[in-house]
């Protein structure tokens, strides 16, 4: 999972690096990463219960 997570972050870091900080691309990347992190936290919490 760590490798997958790193790869996901790299994809969005590169997208943000190649766009302006005030662009829609940058804003969408930030929202997607936040959602991804939230989903991972939920998944880990649920798995810890088992």
Image: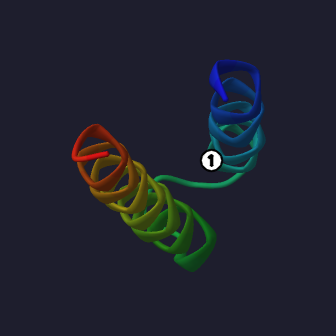
Q: Is residue 36 left or right of residue 43?
A: right
Q: State the image coordinates of residue 4 (x, y, percent, origin top left).
A: 75, 33
Q: State the image coordinates of residue 12 (x, y, percent, origin top left).
A: 67, 47
Q: Is residue 50 left or right of residue 29?
A: left
* Residue located at (71% from left, 42% from top): 8
* Residue located at (64% from left, 33% from top): 5
How is the model colour-coded?
rainbow
Q: Quadrant of the N terminus?
A: top right
Q: Is residue 49 left or right of residue 32?
A: left
Q: Quadrant of the C terminus?
A: top left
Q: Nearer the viewer, residue 30 or 46?
A: 46
| Residue under pointer 1 | 16
Does residue 31 lie above or below 15 as drawn?
below
* Residue located at (46% from left, 53% from top): 21
Q: State the image coordinates of residue 13 (x, y, percent, origin top left).
A: 64, 37
Q: State the image coordinates of residue 41 (x, y, percent, origin top left).
A: 29, 48
Q: Residue 24 appears in which quarter of the rendering?
A: bottom right
Q: Nearer the viewer, residue 8 or 27?
A: 8
How many tags in the picture? 1
**Identity of the residue furthest to the front in this view:** 50
Q: Residues within 10 Å of mark 1 (few under 14, many from 20)?
A: many
For numbered disc 1, what is the local secondary structure?
helix
């Amino acid at each position: 999972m760590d490798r997958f997570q790193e790869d996901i972050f790299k994809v969005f870091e590169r997208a943000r690096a190649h766009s302006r900080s005030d662009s829609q691309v940058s804003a969408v990347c930030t929202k997607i990463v936040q959602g991804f992190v939230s989903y991972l936290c939920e998944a880990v919490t649920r798995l810890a219960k088992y």
